[in-house]
Image (tube, grey):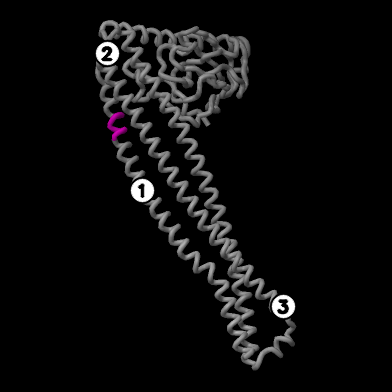
Amino acid sequence: MMRIFHRVSLIVLALGVLTPFVLSIAQTEDVKKNVLDLNDAIVKKKDEIDKLQKQADVYKKNIALKQQQAATLENQIAILNTRIKEFDLNITITKKEIEESKLELDAIRLEMSEREQEAALARARLGENVRILDETARHSPFEIFLSRESVSAIIEHVQSIEAVQREILDTLGSIQTLKMRLEDTAKEFQNKQETLEHLEERLAIQRQELAVQNGYKARVLGETKEKETLFQGLLQQLRAEQQSIDAEISNLERTIREKLKLLDQSYQGGGGKLLLSWPVDPSRGISAYFHDPSYPFRNIFEHPAIDIRTPQGTAIKTPAPGYVARARDGGMGYSYVMLVHPGGYATVYGHVSRILVKEDSYVERGDVIALSGGAPGTPGAGKLTTGPHLHFEVRVNGVPVNPMDYLF
């Protein structure tokens, strides 16, 4: 009778341990189904994004073709209309990417929930096995010996205890593995959350840029009154302004270098490649690259800089030690700061809304020299701007070069 009772007790204990896992099978299947549904939705969203991206590429090609044609009012309006469509499509793509990120976050949440459930069940199993060992430890070996009817029953009892001990070790290993997986999933969740935040920030910037493009189109139509002769006059004015600024920078740089040679012979040291830190945070991206084929004014001149997206009024920091050769306050026109550096280098910071340094002074890396601008109709922006950004040039012996080759 005692032996039968012992076996029944073991069966009851086993059922007590297994019951939570029987219940969890249905829950786990639901979670897996939800994860599969979310993965299907994510795949569909990626397909939608790919199709939209192909359409955006078509817009880019159309803009490039138009820019190769003569600079006429009709052509410029066609370019602007296509750019507006491209911006509008990019907004749609970003919205889709946000939706995709949210689906991925939901999938990760479900995965984390499943991991937590598995860990909870493993801890419950561990607790039950520990309880069994604790119950056994309350009886001396002699008491256990007397309670068994035969030697085989004693051996069976010892084997069952050893099995429980092995299961405890296995469960501890499983809990450790689950903990590591949960930590990895939590990190993945954090990364996806940051991606979502960046996408939402990009969406806000794209909406702003779309509004600026619409405003620029309205300004072009307003200034030209839809007449080709007035548009050609505007182009001549813009070209003249750009050529004047470029000549001013080149001539001034040569003059300043001669002056520096007389004032400080040691300033010409350095010799190696100039290493530049970013003058503003580049995380918002580049809106126009050096000699960018999609630059909206390319049919007027090649873009001699990179345009770094940054909010109006951002502090511009010196990327390397230098001498303030020019701090031109253009009022409601084009304002810029030019620094001369050793080794034949110079840097230019355009569309600034406020200048914070004086000419004929030295600055160190990290000094704030100006505040960014670029919003149309604001101080320092000038006419050649379609939104807030920093126009950043690097020149070697007076010739503009790609700033991306010098930034780190």
Mark 3 or mark 2, which has the lower sequence index? 2
Please name the predominant secondary structure of the magenta segment in the image: helix
Q: Residues within 10 Å of mark 2 (few under 14, many from 20)?
A: many
Give the SS element for disc 1: helix
The disc labelled 3 sits on which kind of residue? Ala
Give the SS element for disc 2: helix
From mark 1 to mark 2, how far is it between C-alphas? Answer: 43 Å
Mark 1 or mark 2, which has the lower sequence index? 1
Q: Nearer the viewer, mark 1 or mark 2?
A: 1
Expressed as whole percent of the image width and height from the top left, the position of residue 214 reads: 36, 19
Q: Residues within 10 Å of mark 3 (few under 14, many from 20)?
A: few
Is the residue 221 above or below the residue 321 in the image? Answer: above
Mark 1 or mark 3, which has the lower sequence index? 1
Q: Nearer the viewer, mark 3 or mark 2?
A: 3
Is the residue 182 above or below the residue 389 in the image? Answer: below
Q: Which residue is disc 1 drawn over?
A: 43
User: Which stretch did the figure color magenta?
Assistant: 55-60
Q: Which residue is disc 3 drawn over?
A: 137
